[in-house]
Amino acid sequence: ADVDAGKAKAALCAACHGPEGKASVPIYPNLAGQNAPYLVKQLKAFKEGKRQDPMMAPFMAALTEADMDNLAAYYASLK
Amino acid sequence: ADVDAGKAKAALCAACHGPEGKASVPIYPNLAGQNAPYLVKQLKAFKEGKRQDPMMAPFMAALTEADMDNLAAYYASLK
């Protein structure tokens, strides 16, 4: 996975998940240091609708599998 | 919320989420330092079946709201 590409794509996510993966609001999860395989599994679940969240759903259409892997690697790399 | 009570209850969770909230397997999420309101929201979603996971479901029946608040406070308190 490409952490730099993930970081660029994460601009979409920073509003809620924070610029450094620490959520701006505590009802949203911190992503910094989370496990990449878990993050990929959740992004896929949101994309397939297996996991539902009105905030996340609109972002999924634009995400490719590569994007998901890169985003997960990026957030896992943060402390 | 009662962090000590949460720690005691977390014995149930340690097998997958790790004794210190760092998951034993990367497909499971780290919980250490996660936001308590987010954790409570997810536990409730699992209990109500709004979020589904075959591993989590069996634990939910035994969890009261107080347990959920205590568990969330405990894991949020870990670094």
Image (spheres, coloured by chain):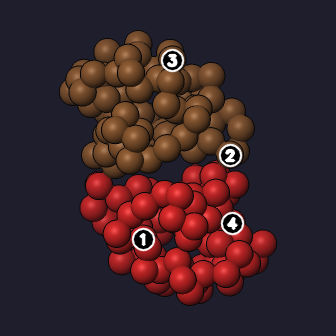
Chain colours: A brown, B red
Quick check: marks 2 and 3 in contact, CB under 8 Å? no
Front: mark 4 or 3: 3
Q: CA distance from mark 2 to mark 4?
A: 13 Å
Which of the two discs, 2 and 3, labels the residue nearer the N terminus?
3
Q: CA distance from mark 4 to mark 3?
A: 29 Å
Tell me which amino acid carries mark 2: Ile
Per the image, the residue denoted by label 1 is B56
Q: Chain of mark 3?
A: A
Per the image, the residue denoted by label 4 is B73
Q: Is residue A68 above or below residue B72?
A: above
Front: mark 1 or 2: 1
Residue B43 visible in rendering: no
Residue B66 as seen in the image, left or right of residue A7 = right
Q: Chain of mark 4?
A: B
Q: Is residue B12 above or below residue A78?
A: below
Q: CA distance from mark 1 to mark 3?
A: 30 Å
| Neighbour tally class for label 3: few under 14, some 14-19, many 20 plus, Cα within 10 Å | few
| Neighbour tally class for label 1: few under 14, some 14-19, many 20 plus, Cα within 10 Å | few
Residue A12, numbered label: 3
